[in-house]
């Protein structure tokens, strides 16, 4: 996070984003995408076309939606699971080999690197999402800002304010 010296409300997507961001090609299978996300310990990634332009996003919510529709498979192989937001274990091997473009969330919420933190937070709240993709003018993903990144900035400001308040508090001398 590049925010150490900037005032909180001056922070932008460029200050908070994680870059580079892992992208997934639109023709990758859902099963392979699930394995890659699980191995990378991330819960979502942008889906790109052959030119690298953002088409959508695949997140744990998309897997939950797929599982909720009764996705099943007859083949059982080594079990790899992912934990749904409410704690249920979902078997990744049950996910189909169909391309992720059929399961992704199309038209993801995207912002420019210059987008202020307040606007980022409002977009997340309005869309009920936990990540916003930072894209270039050519609509290519260049970073990602998660709700955790925004909360980390809030925590940093709160900690600094508490330390400043503690330093400014008058010291009371005890009389003997």
Image: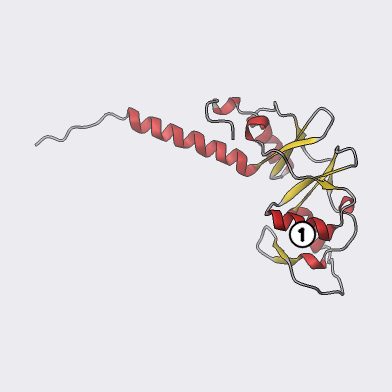
* Of residues 36 and 144, the one drawn nearer to the viewer in this rendering: 36
For image coordinates 65% across by 63% down, the residue present is 87
Quadrant location of residue 15?
A: top right
* Of residues 20 and 87, the one drawn nearer to the viewer in this rendering: 20
- Is residue 57 toward the left or the right of residue 7 in the image? right
- Is residue 80 toward the left or the right of residue 174 in the image? right
For image coordinates 87% across by 63% down, the residue present is 96
- Is residue 170 toward the left or the right of residue 25 in the image? left
Q: On the image, numbered disc 1 is attached to which residue?
A: 35
Quadrant location of residue 99?
A: bottom right
Residue 73: image location, x then y, percent: 86, 71
Q: Residues within 10 Å of mark 1 (few under 14, many from 20)?
A: some
* Of residues 141 and 121, the one drawn nearer to the viewer in this rendering: 141
Residue 45: image location, x then y, percent: 76, 47
As drawn, 118 above or below 97 = above
* Of residues 71 and 45, the one drawn nearer to the viewer in this rendering: 45
As drawn, 100 above or below 17 = below
């Amino acid at each position: 996070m590049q925010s150490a010296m900037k005032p909180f409300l001056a922070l932008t997507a460029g200050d908070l984003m994680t870059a580079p961001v892992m992208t997934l090609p639109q023709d990758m299978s859902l099963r392979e995408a699930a394995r890659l996300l699980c191995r990378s310990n991330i819960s979502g990634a942008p889906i790109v076309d052959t030119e690298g332009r953002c088409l959508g996003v695949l997140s744990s919510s998309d897997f939950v939606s797929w599982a909720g529709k009764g996705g099943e498979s007859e083949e059982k192989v080594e079990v790899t699971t992912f934990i749904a937001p409410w704690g249920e274990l979902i078997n990744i091997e049950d996910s189909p080999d169909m391309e992720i473009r059929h399961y992704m969330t199309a038209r993801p919420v995207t912002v420019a690197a210059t987008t202020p933190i307040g606007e980022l937070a409002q977009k997340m709240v309005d869309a009920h999402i936990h990540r916003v993709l930072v894209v270039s003018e050519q609509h290519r993903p260049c970073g990602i800002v998660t709700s955790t990144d925004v909360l980390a900035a809030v925590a940093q400001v709160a900690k600094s304010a508490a330390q400043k308040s503690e330093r400014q508090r008058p010291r009371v001398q005890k009389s003997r």
